[in-house]
């Protein structure tokens, strides 16, 4: 325990010596002990670009070996060959987990960087969900658009973006701009799907901060929060998503619509990369017309592309990641920003404190991680679904895409822990499910529906107060 406490003290001392942006030392305030410990004993004190991608202190010995192995399986680019490290495609969306979740974060969304309306022929790092307007999948395409393919195979289609911009004013006269990206898909490999028949929802990857803690959440605590999360004066009422798989009903906690009850390691390998496994033994392109041709049949091997042992190491890697401690917690502006965060009701959804269940978590093949149990954590999320509105710029955050019980306008509150390091880790500040917000102000100003009242509190603040609230977000 002693070296651990020492780290905490060091972190405070470092924070105390830091200078503010203006070069003037800020007056420090007394922060309560344990204040910056985002995830109990899994809290780490890295502020480097590896802050999301470093193991917790309790990861030693054999656990550490498996962590390193999982990290490698996660990051190494897969090949189209058969055997270890192979199995990519024939069609896919990314070539390794890390290709989209660089440094266990959010790979800079390449498509977003392209010039107006240009074709995105490169790799996007985004996931594109496609369905018919009646909710049924397109038979030849499945759930996710695979815009990449191995040599000799046609990608399913290509994604394009057109951006719409609008300038708005805060009550004090300051202006901000919002950008709404509209997506279209061309070069459908089989049918030409008509845009009017299609719903297309685009997602940028999520940060992996706190995956183990999220898996160790106590469903009872989240369900109690859903019963309690009813603030009529704010227009807020969160609800749970549930996933039924093989007759088992589980609380959804992962993904932008809380559409996942587990870490989706098997789904990631199968659906995102075409790597078959025990849970998803079929190739994602199975049944596609191009695969029925004799020359393509050789690409579909009978054996599974990755073993459950290997996937358990990836699971272990994700759940053993440390959660970065907050920085600058005793800076006056940061503290002021935190008070404003509460005044604006942000914590009514971005819940500050939760607890993990006593037994911790169990990985894919039964390995136990008791270290994740009985921890007080600060994820800044209630893991509930909220209606985020459909009004702003005529669309709001509604994507019309249904996931389990989540409707098009409903989203899981994104956990904010570690968000202040995203720029350091991934080199960008794109936020929200499709990365449409280019900075914190835009992310907040896209909040509508249940988030409307809270957003308006922020909009009505003085410029200094808005900046202080953002300084607080940067400290997470
Ligand atoms: C093509 C890019 C891409 C690839 C490849 C990819 N992911 Fe993801 N991942 C995403 C996106 C985008 C999301 C958000 C999905 C959503 O909410 O609909 C996501 C979500 C997740 C989540 C849920 C995170 C949370 O906070 O709830 C986990 C866990 C995850 N991915 C793990 C993996 C693993 C493990 C692999 C490799 C086996 C992988 N991903 C491969 C893009 C990718
Ligand atoms: C009604 C619930 C609710 C309230 C209140 C709320 N949020 Fe959110 N917040 C959400 C949801 C849901 C999302 C995810 C929306 C999406 O991705 O489309 C989100 C996303 C965000 C993001 C982007 C996170 C990321 O990594 O992409 C930030 C930043 C944020 N909120 C800050 C705030 C602040 C600051 C306040 C108070 C002014 C606030 N929120 C109030 C529900 C809420």
Image: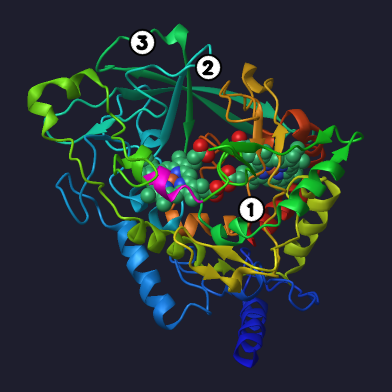
Question: Is 40 drawn above or below residue 113 in the view shown?
Answer: below
CA neighbours of label 3 inside 10 A, class few (<14), some (14 to 19), many (20+): some
Q: Which residue is mark 1?
A: 416
Q: Is mark 1 within 8 Å of ligand 2?
A: yes
**Mark 1 secondary-structure assignment:** loop
Question: Is 108 drawn above or below residue 221 in the view shown?
Answer: above
Circle 3/circle 1 CB separation < 8 Å: no
Circle 2/circle 1 CB separation < 8 Å: no
Instruction: Please state the extent of the stretch shown in magenta in the rendering.
Output: 263-268
Horizontal and vertical percent position of residue 430: 51, 43
Look at the magenta stretch and give its main secondary structure.
Answer: helix
Q: CA distance from mark 2 to mark 1?
A: 31 Å
Residue displayed at 30% across by 43% down: 276
Q: Is residue 94 magenta?
A: no
Circle 3/circle 2 CB separation < 8 Å: no
Describe residue 25's horizontal placement relative to residue 234 as left or right: left
Q: Which residue is mark 2?
A: 135
CA neighbours of label 1 inside 10 A, class few (<14), some (14 to 19), many (20+): some
Horizontal and vertical percent position of residue 71: 36, 64
Describe residue 279's horizontal placement relative to residue 222 as left or right: left
Residue 428 can be seen in this image: no
Closer to the chain start, of discs 2 and 1, is 2
Q: Nearer the viewer, residue 228 or 476?
A: 228
**Mark 2 secondary-structure assignment:** loop
């Amino acid at each position: 325990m002693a070296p651990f406490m020492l780290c905490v003290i060091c972190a405070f001392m470092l924070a105390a010596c830091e200078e503010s942006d203006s070069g003037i030392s800020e007056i420090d305030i007394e922060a309560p002990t344990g204040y910056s410990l985002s995830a109990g004993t899994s809290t780490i004190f890295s502020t480097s670009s590896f802050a999301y991608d470093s193991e917790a202190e309790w990861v030693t010995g054999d656990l550490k070996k498996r962590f390193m192995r999982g990290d490698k399986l996660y990051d190494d680019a897969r090949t189209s060959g058969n055997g270890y490290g192979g199995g990519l495609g024939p069609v896919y969306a990314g070539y390794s987990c890390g290709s989209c979740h660089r440094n266990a974060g959010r790979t800079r969304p390449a498509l977003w960087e392209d010039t107006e309306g240009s074709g995105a022929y490169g790799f996007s790092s985004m996931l594109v969900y496609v369905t018919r307007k009646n909710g049924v999948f397109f038979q030849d395409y499945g759930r996710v658009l695979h815009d990449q393919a191995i040599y000799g195979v046609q990608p399913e289609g290509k994604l394009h973006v057109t951006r719409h911009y609008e300038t708005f004013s805060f009550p004090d006269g300051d202006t901000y701009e919002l950008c709404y990206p509209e997506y279209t898909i061309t070069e459908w490999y089989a049918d030409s799907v008509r845009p009017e028949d299609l719903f297309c929802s685009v997602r940028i990857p999520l940060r992996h901060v706190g995956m183990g803690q999220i898996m160790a959440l106590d469903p009872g605590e989240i369900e109690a929060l859903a019963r309690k999360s009813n603030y009529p004066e704010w227009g807020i009422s969160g609800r749970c998503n549930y996933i039924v798989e093989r007759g088992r009903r589980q609380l959804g906690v992962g993904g932008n619509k809380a559409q996942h009850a587990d870490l989706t390691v098997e789904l990631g390998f199968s659906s995102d990369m075409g790597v078959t496994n025990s849970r998803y033994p079929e190739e994602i392109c199975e049944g596609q017309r191009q695969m029925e041709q004799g020359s393509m049949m050789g690409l579909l091997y009978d054996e599974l592309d990755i073993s459950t042992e290997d996937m358990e190491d990836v699971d272990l890697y994700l759940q053993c990641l440390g959660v970065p401690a907050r920085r600058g917690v005793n800076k006056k502006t940061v503290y002021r920003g935190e008070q404003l965060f509460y005044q604006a009701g942000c914590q009514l959804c971005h819940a500050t404190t939760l607890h993990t269940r006593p037994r911790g978590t169990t990985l894919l093949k039964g390995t136990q991680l008791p270290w994740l149990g009985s921890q007080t954590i600060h994820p800044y999320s209630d893991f509930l679904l909220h209606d985020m509105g459909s009004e702003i710029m005529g669309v709001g955050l509604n994507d019309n895409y249904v996931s389990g019980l989540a409707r098009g306008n409903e989203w899981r509150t994104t956990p904010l822990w570690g968000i202040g390091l995203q720029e350091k880790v991934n080199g960008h500040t794109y936020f929200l499910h499709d990365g449409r917000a280019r900075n914190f102000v835009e992310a907040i100003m896209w909040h509508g529906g249940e988030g409307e009242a809270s957003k308006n509190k922020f909009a009505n603040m003085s410029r200094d107060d808005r900046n202080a609230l953002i300084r607080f977000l940067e400290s997470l």
